[in-house]
Amino acid sequence: MSHQIPGKKVTLIMGSPRKNSNTHTLLLESERALRERGYATEIVFIDDLSLRDCRGCHGCKQPDNDRCIMQDDMQQVYRLMDESASIILAAPVYFGYVPAQTKAWLDRLVPYIGTDLGPKITGGKRVSFIFTQNMPDTGMFEQSLKGFMNSVAMTGLIVADYLIAPDCEMGQKPPVTERSDIMERAYVLGKNLAE
């Protein structure tokens, strides 16, 4: 049994609308590695939240404010991200990119970018990514996924690692639990984030 390291928490953001999916399974495998190393974790299911789309209103850029002015569940996500030592985001690939709810999360990270486009997150906070896709070629959507990761990095989060799990289609192909190489890679992603 592991003990929790004080002040060490990792927020796990689930960008898939499907619980118990391949994406969720891989995220749980990363979580297992983190917990074995004494990290507290909390999973956020974006699809369960009430998140409004960014309005581009620049309310978060006013001198007396550094948060989005929309009062919805994203306020909770900001708090969790701020309290965390690191973050893992897991999402499936839909039509070559992350799902809409994951893109909405990305858009709502604007408060973490200054008016000069400089990052506001400091201190070396790291983020890793898990992507699952139906296509067998891991390179097929890699450029668009790297664009997504680079956009997240504009906040100051440091991209530590990413996993693209190919040939995953719940109910159509063997579950990811039968693919030891991908399960091990997800575990190592969590383990490395804890070091």
Image (cartoon, rainbow, N blue to C red):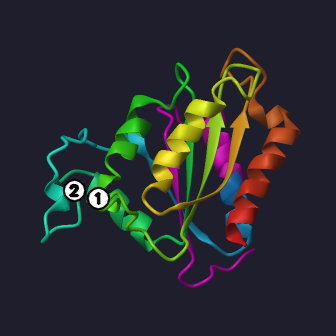
Q: Is residue 181 above or below residue 160?
A: above
Answer with left or right where residue 76 lies relative to residue 135.
left
Q: Is residue 109 above or below residue 37?
A: above
Q: Nearer the viewer, residue 159 or 163?
A: 159
Q: Are marks 2 and 1 in contact (CB under 8 Å)?
A: yes
Amino acid at circle 1: Pro
Report x, y in % for residue 30: 69, 54
Q: Residues within 10 Å of mark 1 (few under 14, many from 20)?
A: many
The secondary element bearing badge 1 is classed as: helix
Residue pushed farthest right? 180
Q: Residue at x 61, y 48 (%)?
A: 129
Report x, y in % for residue 176: 76, 33
Residue pushed farthest bottom? 6
Q: Residue at x 38, y 62 (%)?
A: 118
2 vs 1, front mark: 1
Q: Which residue is mark 1?
A: 111
The secondary element bearing badge 2 is classed as: loop
Give whichever of discs 2 and 1 has the lower sequence position.
Answer: 2
Residue pushed farthest top? 172
**For residue 68, which numbered disc appears in the image?**
2
Report x, y in % for residue 177: 78, 36
Report x, y in % for residue 115: 26, 59
Answer with the quarter of the image where residue 134 lies: top right
In the rendered image, the quadrant that contains the N terminus is bottom right
Q: Is residue 22 magenta?
A: yes
Q: Give, as a single range, the part of the protein colored magenta.
A: 1-29
Q: Is residue 34 magenta?
A: no
